[in-house]
Amino acid sequence: MKKTIRIGTRDSELALWQASIVKSKLENLGYTTKLVSVKSEGDLVLDKPLYEMGITGIFTKTLDVAMLNGTVDVAVHSMKDVPTQLPKGIIQTAVLERASSEDILVTKGEIDFESPCTIATGSLRRKAQWLHRYSNHNLVDLRGNVNTRLQKLKDNNWEGAIFAKAGLQRINLLPENYINLDWMLPAPAQGAMVVVALDNDVYCKEATSKLNNSAAEICTHIEREFLKTLEGGCTAPIGAFAEIIDDEILFKGCLFSLDGQTKLEVEKRVLTSTYKGFGKDCATFILNNGGAELMLSIKNQLK
């Protein structure tokens, strides 16, 4: 049976770009597709920090419902927005080749980091890592889509704002003035796009699985397993990055206190052929070395 694959997406410029890439790749394989855009709660409510909104699935919930009620067949997400536990009946079918995982600081010119600065970010992970490095800086909340956040940086008296490099590159908004934050560990699966489909939809599962990049799938699996084991969701300052080097995987992970003063980290290698359970092992190392107590403290502070 041949059918038109309805691709669900948020309606931000970046989300539409990502969904259009999947649409193009599927059509190049001979499939018929169309885009269906919806607004998520995360796009509609811009006056609260994400961690105050019951973050898990805030950008994906609307598309999950659209899939389960038959409005769309598949959905495309920035993988870092996707909860580690997918809703019943929905499965991951493809992780596309990963773009840059780096965070960057978009600036208005030269910055003296030794002086007090005001830096904008809506991410607990970025805030904690920044404060760990620059404890005398002021961090302010920044919400909205990429375009909105860039405009807010222009409109406010801030020295800079932190963005995912991949998001700005994808829609040609990477400005001249930015600094690569190569010392900052990214969010698990940052820079990766994921496709999900209904578990009982054989046609769409088969079609979208052809887009899967095995290296990206393995690395993001490890990072998300690390996140899931720490039970962070998006409500704790957790960073993770895995990369395949020859026949090995190098993993770096971290957990910070909300104020950035406490830092727990892990760095381990494993053979690519034995990667299953590696993310869990790395998280267990963190939990056994102060992480369990730190996670409890973070959850109590965010209540």
Image (spheres, helix red, strand yellow):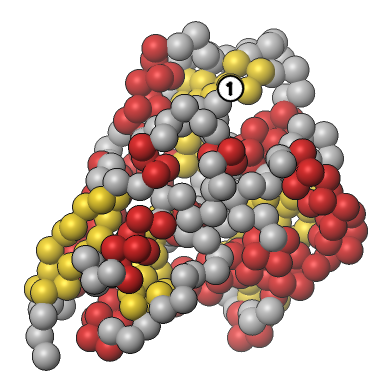
Say which quarter of the image contains residue 123: top right
The percent coordinates of residue 62 (x first, y second) are 35, 55
Q: Is residue 108 left or right of residue 300?
A: left
Total marks in image? 1
Task: Name which residue lies at 73% across and 52% down.
Answer: 254
Is residue 161 something that shows in the picture?
A: yes
Q: Element type at marker 1?
A: strand
Judge by depth and name the residue closer to the eye, 147 or 274: 147
Say which quarter of the image contains residue 206: bottom left
Judge by depth and name the residue closer to the eye, 186 or 149: 149
Quadrant location, the N terminus:
bottom left
The percent coordinates of residue 274 (x first, y second) are 66, 85
Judge by depth and name the residue closer to the eye, 166 or 110: 166
Is residue 280 depicted above or below 206 in this figure? above
Q: Is residue 84 left or right of residue 206?
A: right
Task: Name which residue lies at 85% across and 57% down.
Answer: 292
Task: Name which residue lies at 59% across and 38% down.
Answer: 52
Quadrant location, the C terminus:
top right
The percent coordinates of residue 195 (x first, y second) are 35, 68
**Residue located beneath label 1 in the image:** 140
Q: Amino acid at mark 1?
A: Val
Q: Residues within 10 Å of mark 1 (few under 14, many from 20)?
A: few
Is residue 252 something that shows in the picture?
A: no
The percent coordinates of residue 242 (x first, y second) are 60, 63
Task: Name which residue lies at 63% across and 38% down.
Answer: 124
Is residue 104 depicted above or below 188 in this figure? above
The residue positioned farthest toward the front in the image shown: 69
